[in-house]
Amino acid sequence: MPALDLSALDPEQAAAVRAPRGPVCVLAGAGTGKTRTITHRIAHLVANGHVKADQVLAVTFTARAAGEMRERLRAMGLGGEAGQVQARTFHSAAMRQLRYFWPQVVGDVPWRLLESKFPIVGQAAHRAGLGSSTDLIRDLLSEIEWAKAMLIAPEDYPAGANKYKRDAPADPIRVAQVYAGYESAKTSADGLLLDFSDLLLHTAAALEDFPSVADEFRGRYRSFVVDEYQDVTPLQQRVLDAWLGERDDLTVVGDANQTIYSFTGATPNYLLDFSRRFPDATVVRLERDYRSTPQVVSLANRVIGAARGRIAGTRLALIGQRPDGPEPEFAEHADPTAEAMAVAGRIKKLIAKGVPASEIAVLYRVNAQSEPFEQALTERGIAFQVRGGELFFQRPEVRQAMTALRQVDNRDDLPDDARGGAELITLVRAALAPVGLTAEEPAGAQAKERWSSLLALVQLTEEVVRHDPEMDLTGLLRELATRAEAKHPPTVDGVTLASLHAAKGLEWDAVFLVGVNEGLLPIQHALGDNSGSGESGIEEERRLFYVGVTRAREHLTISWALARSEGGRANRRRSRFLVGLVPDDSPASRIASSAKGPKVDERKRPLCRVCLKPLIGTYATMLGRCRRCPAELDATLLEALTQWRSEKAETLRVREFVIFTDTTLNAIAEQLPTDDTALALIAGIGPKKIESYGADVLAIVASRLRVTSGKTAGQK
């Protein structure tokens, strides 16, 4: 192959590419060019004779990502053909290997890939005495997939569910019975049925239990690359370990801050522990963000900067490389309908200014939030497509709900006054109860998604009745049908509507993060610790918010609604993740300060040391002055403090902001504290900080004051 040109890489990317053969860990933040880096590393290893092209196996998690990697490698003359680098998903690689080694391991017993697990799980659920609803079967299926990803056998499921605090869709003992029944049903006289997890399990077992198979495989593949390593499950890690054997020619790439799939068994622990497993590993941090403007990058850093727990200790501080762009916008609305109309209006203006509709996305926490945005975009004549989910009125549960409502409307035994007006909402709730609408949110991911969609239908009914108090069930069905029929947008060149999970790995010029409310982001059921990695549900939701922010290249708008439905009570709060992010001069900040809530005694607020007015907002409180009030900052002192912090962080092996944030250093350089009491008056400096760093800081301030006082005396 031709000589490899590394001139287009930044210093950190080049360092990762040139790292010696052996274990390499690339911690790559959002938008930092990780795919370019790992493909160039593969090319570098091949060009320098460390490995032949066909001895490299690169794995990732989605067919789309694997395809992108193959395209990059093909452009470099390394992929797509026999004798070239193999870039595949874990399951694709395992299937290929299993088909080849099966005769040596199992013999003549035939196997085939299971096309649908649903019928078998349904039969096992029936035998275990559980219901047969579609949502329950889907939740049981997901729970079995999680258990297999975690290497938990059927008999160990109850203990595993308790250990990892699983939100099991049924009694864990019953779930274990379904799991065992499912596994047994895949074996018959005609051979074996294997699901995707089985592909990985059998591949690992073949390499672990048959030395001849392991020797042949390891003679074939000598170098491995794993993308999105923070999303590896214990089962996938077992396969990777079997591939490697005692070797260490492994490059992994990941970002623990983007760990958002713990509910599937994914864990960042293998990424976080990489240097412990391989003490001689080369670790490179990619923090230069080429995707987003500095304004978006700054907000993303502040979002993840508030994270807690083990993952937070490895956070990457992104550095924006693009030209400046607009500041992120924040907006508070009365209800989801008003929020959707405002978003649609803003999208209309962006399109008029030349932003392609395909470069705009509306992102939300759950798919059931999409309906008002579908409606608002339709009314504006803006094409859209729903990614990772169906249009609201095409969802199975919504279609079933519409059928149930039509059946009620066709009944002759309902009195006329029960069909409309104030009774209509009660009638709709009763009609939707048999299809899954309960008073409380149910357990199980599928059941929760179904319940959210049905609840959205009730809220739509409330909205319709509020506008037309005489509306009856027949009229409601006509209104809902009109809305459903209006939504036939093209599937290309339109605004993208997607859940935050479905948006992972994608990016747009303009992103609208909507419904950023408590109970939605973070989602209500994440308040407990239900993640397999040991991180709290709240922190996983924070990372999900961070993923959403980092999808935006230039325009970013974050919004929330105070009521659940149009005209409803304003009893919702904006997300806790927005604390300290909404600027004091934002309209959303002014609205929030005037909204109903506990009255704040202005006399108890800290006062600006310049104008003596009460301080509003985290930034102002940290500095001890209003953002717009003038202040004299000792730039030389700030430089000295920054240098001290850098050296201290290196000595303690912690990130610099763990010691003091930039804002705190600015406040010190402005206020010039001369004792512990003055230090304690600066927001963010508590007793522990004073005990650990107070003497150093005061000594630096005192030294600077001596210099300035000496200059003043000399001038006199």
Image (spheres, grey):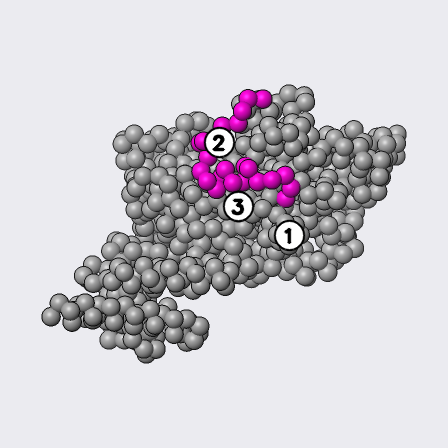
Q: Residue at x 25, y 71 (%)?
A: 706
Mark yes or no: residue 211 visible.
yes
The picture places residue 73, in percent across and down from the top left corner, at 57, 27
Identity of the amino acid at label 1?
Answer: Pro
Helix, strand or loop at mark 2: loop
Q: Residue at x 85, y 35 (%)?
A: 212
Q: Earlier in the sequence, mark 2 or mark 3?
A: 2
Mark 1, other Cα within 10 Å: few <14 / some 14–19 / many ≥20: few
Q: Which mark is residue 279?
A: 1
Residue on which the image places disc 3 = 284
Distance Cα–Cα, label 1 vs label 2? 27 Å
Q: Earlier in the sequence, mark 1 or mark 2?
A: 2
Identity of the amino acid at label 2?
Answer: Leu
Q: Earlier in the sequence, mark 3 or mark 1?
A: 1
Mark 2, other Cα within 10 Å: few <14 / some 14–19 / many ≥20: some
Residue on which the image places disc 2 = 6
The picture places residue 582, in percent across and down from the top left corner, at 32, 55
Q: What are the residue bounds of the magenta stretch?
A: 1-23
Tell me if residue 83 comes above or below residue 625 in the rendering: above
The picture places residue 45, in percent across and down from the top left corner, at 61, 32
